[in-house]
Amino acid sequence: MFPGRGSIPPTPRRVTLPSTLTANGTKISARSTALSAGGRQRVERRWHLGVSVPDLPPNFRALVVAALRSGEYTQARGCLRLWPTLPKDRQRFCVAGVACDVAAAHGWGEWQRDRFTAPDGLVTSTLMPEGIRVALGLSPAALDSLVTANDDGVPLSTLAAALED
C-alpha cells in the first residue's frame, strides 16, 4: 500500500536518454560515476516508489536551462544549496539545486535552509527529487552524468548546453 494513494501507485512517465551527454565538444559520461552516484540513485528510487510527473510547466526543462545560463547562480559542489541564510546572490547551487530552485519558484517544493522539501515529503540536501528528474526528462544515468560533471567543476553554462541537447 502507498500511504494516501490507495493500493495502486501512479504510473511514472518513462523517458530514455543516453547515459553520455555532449556539450560544446565536452563529453560527460555516467560510467565514471557508477560506484558513487549510482548508490545515491538507488537510495533515491527506494524512497520514490510510484513517483509521478510533478505539476510543473511544460517548458520546465527550458526554464532550468535559462536559469543555468542566467548568471544568477554561483556553482556549488556536493550539495543542492550552500549558505542558505545569505542573500540569494551570495548562495551557491549545484546543477540539481538550480532545478530544485526553479521548481520551488513554480510551487513544487520549498527550501528549508539548505534542504529542499518535495511535495511527497522527501527532505534532501544532496539529491534531486525523483519527480524533478522525471519532469526534466532525464534518465538516472544522465542525471548522474550532470551531477558528476558539476562536482568536477564543469561550468553551469556548459551543463545547460548538455541539458538542452
Image (cartoon, helix red, strand yellow):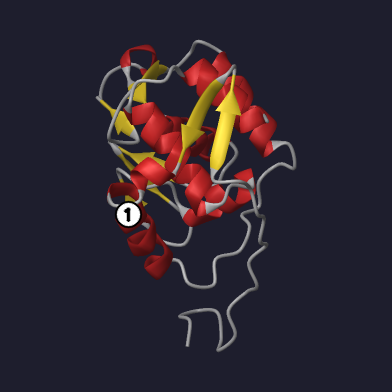
Residue shown at 50%/10% (left/top)?
Answer: 71
The answer to whether residue 96 shows anywhere in this view is: no
The residue that label 1 is drawn on is 40
The mark total stands at 1
Of residue 67 and residue 20, the one placed in the foreground of this image is: 20
Of residue 135 and residue 85, the one placed in the foreground of this image is: 135
The residue furthest right is 58
Instruction: For the C terminus, give its image quadrant.
Output: top right
Of residue 6 and residue 158, the one placed in the foreground of this image is: 158
Q: Position of residue 47 (x, y in %)?
A: 38, 67
Look at the numbered disc 1 and give the secondary structure of its residue. helix
Residue shown at 57%/15% (left/top)?
Answer: 69
Q: Position of residue 34 (x, y in %)?
A: 35, 51
> Is 148 displayed left or right of 69 in the figure?
left
Q: Amino acid at mark 1?
A: Arg
> Is 61 displayed left or right of 42 in the figure?
right
Q: Quadrant of residue 92?
A: top left
Q: Is residue 145 above or below residue 50?
A: above
Q: Position of residue 78 (x, y in %)?
A: 27, 34
> Is 67 displayed left or right of 98 in the figure?
right
The answer to whether residue 130 shows anywhere in this view is: yes
Residue shown at 38%/39% (left/top)?
Answer: 111
Q: Is residue 121 above or below residue 90?
A: below
Q: Is residue 21 above or below residue 153?
A: below
> Is 131 displayed left or right of 77 in the figure?
right
For label 1, count other residues whose C-alpha is less than 10 Å away and answer few (under 14), some (14-19) or many (20+). Answer: some
Q: Quadrant of residue 52?
A: bottom right
Q: Position of residue 64 (x, y in %)?
A: 59, 30
